[in-house]
Amino acid sequence: LQQLLGDMLRNDASFEDFLESQQTSIIQLRTILNILYAIAGLTLIVAYLIKVYRLWIPAVSANESQYRLGYRAALDRLSAVGLHRNFGESREKFAARIAATIPSIQPMTRTHLALALGDSQHEPDTASEWKELDQSIRHEISSTTVSWRKLLGILNPFSWLLTK
């Protein structure tokens, strides 16, 4: 108290210095902001890694799971350009809805469902058929989608969250 009164009598600058020296903050604002920036940066990095993984893994996967992972990758590509399933919409209805712009999605959906449900007639030439369908979907997406949508799809790290 004596030091406070002495600083008050001297001048305002020393009084302000005294008040600042007496304030103790357990958590600094700068530290909180740095932690928030780090969390945001890590979230973006992880989201991009998941996106790349989901698009890349079908190319190196085994034949047993290639149809499932490839179908998911095709849906991720479609979600990136703004074509995703609505709530409660079946795979077949979604394929029928976007068949005007992406016609290869219907045979891919039929093949995926046949393989997922255990249809043995799709087994012999599934890998080559699947690669053809995947290439045609990629071509249809690139030819029917405007450039800004494709760029937005590449830049959006969370587009895979819309895939159902």
Image: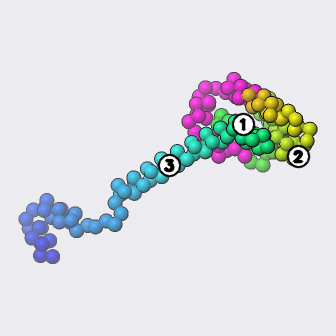
* Residue type, numbered disc 1: Ala
Q: Quadrant of residue 50?
A: top right
The residue beneath circle 1 is 74
- Tell me the CA gap for discs 3 and 1: 26 Å
Mark on residue 42? 3
Magenta region: 136-164
Is residue 89 something that shows in the picture?
A: yes
Mark on residue 34? none
The residue beneath circle 2 is 118
Location of the N terminus by quadrant is bottom left
Question: At 65% across and 34% down in the image, what residue appears?
Answer: 81
Residue nearer the viewer, 151 or 57: 57
* Residue type, numbered disc 3: Leu
Question: At 57% across and 45% down in the image, what residue appears?
Answer: 47
The spot of residue 102 in percent (x, y) is 76, 30
Question: At 22% across and 63% down in the image, what residue appears?
Answer: 20
Tag 2 and tag 1, C-beta contact below 8 Å:
no
Is residue 82 something that shows in the picture?
A: no
* Up/down of 23 relative to 139, above or below: below
| Disc 2: CA contacts within 10 A as few (<14), some (14-19) or many (>=20) | few
Question: At 82% across and 31% down in the image, what residue appears?
Answer: 129
The spot of residue 42 in percent (x, y) is 50, 49
